[in-house]
Amino acid sequence: RGQRYRGLIAPAIAAFDVIVAQTEADSERMSRLGRGADAVSGNLKFDQAVAPDARERGARWRQLLGERPVVVAASTRNGEEALLLAAWRDRVAAGDRVPLLVVVPRHPDRFEIVANLMAQALATAAPGARLMRRADLESAAPGLAQAPLLLGDSMGEMQRWYACADAVIMGGSLLPFGSQNLIEANALGCPVVLGPSTFNFEQAASEAIAAGAAVQAPDASAAFAVALRIAGDPAERGNRSGAALAFTQAHRGATERTLAALEAWLGAALRPPR
């Protein structure tokens, strides 16, 4: 699309003092618009620190939720929850032993919308079961260890959900939204299942799949099935968890590479005039 507006974009790119690209492909795209990157740093998201209490809190939640496998649908977007709940209902109707499904919507203004969808799914597939929510974890409400569905209606706690999960279905990838951040889940050793749409994390997704840290499925139903398989298989889960940690560790360092690329320019910019 940039080529269509090259007359505007090329001079703008030429005016930058330093360009640091995330990938070689990004640098090549910039080159086609008149100037390649001065450096390729990698993805800064690999350098995000794990919150000090994430693992501890996630482990505490896990104790409250019982010993059954836990699948977290993380940062889900509009339309994806309905697809996952349909897959969940199909499994329940087939008489399968279904792990706990935790749904954590991306946007807080959709919490109640998703709560209604989950309540409707419970009414048809598990009559009499109460929809559990994030506040029930705080109060250690009775019935958590048997709850079939749980709504993660809170903000800023995604790392805790990853630390609690056996497998994660990454929101934004089941419909054409381009996926949310799979790197954060892998950094906590959580295997990730991706849907078909990953254009926001194209390189990270392909490399995670190659490393065994993630699996890609063609649709929501298949993604749910793969997540159930991983969550219910200790050997596969352990192998993919180790692969996830190794994958994120191997890709750290983008912050240092970015700062190194900026160092010479910053030195010249900050040097007082003679």
Image: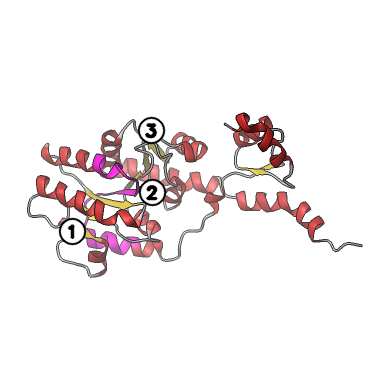
Determine the secondary structure under disc 3.
loop
Q: Quadrant of the C terminus?
A: bottom right
Q: Quadrant of the N terminus?
A: top right
Q: Earlier in the sequence, mark 3 or mark 2?
A: 2
> Eyeballing the image, is 29 above or below 100?
above
Please identify the quarter of the rendering in which residue 5 is found: top right
44 sits to left or right of 69: right
Residue type (three-letter) at the residue carrying disc 2:
Cys
Q: Is residue 164 visible?
A: no
139 sits to left or right of 96: right
Residue occupying image coordinates x 16% and y 37%: 90
Q: Which mark is residue 145?
A: 1
Residue occupying image coordinates x 34% and y 33%: 217
In the image, which residues are magenta? 58-84
Q: Position of residue 43 (x, y in %)?
A: 56, 46
Q: Which mark is residue 196?
A: 3
Determine the secondary structure under disc 1.
helix
- The CA distance from mark 3 to mark 1 is 32 Å
Residue occupying image coordinates x 83% and y 61%: 271
Observer-side mark, 3 or 2, equals 3
Residue type (three-letter) at the residue carrying disc 1:
Ala
Q: Position of residue 14 (x, y in %)?
A: 73, 40
> Eyeballing the image, is 267 above or below 197?
below
> Eyeballing the image, is 272 above or below 90?
below
Q: Is residue 147 visible?
A: yes
Q: Earlier in the sequence, mark 1 or mark 2?
A: 1
Task: Residue under label 2, please give it.
Answer: 190
Binning the other alpha carbons within 10 Å of mark 1 as few (below 14), some (14 to 19) or many (20 upward) gives some
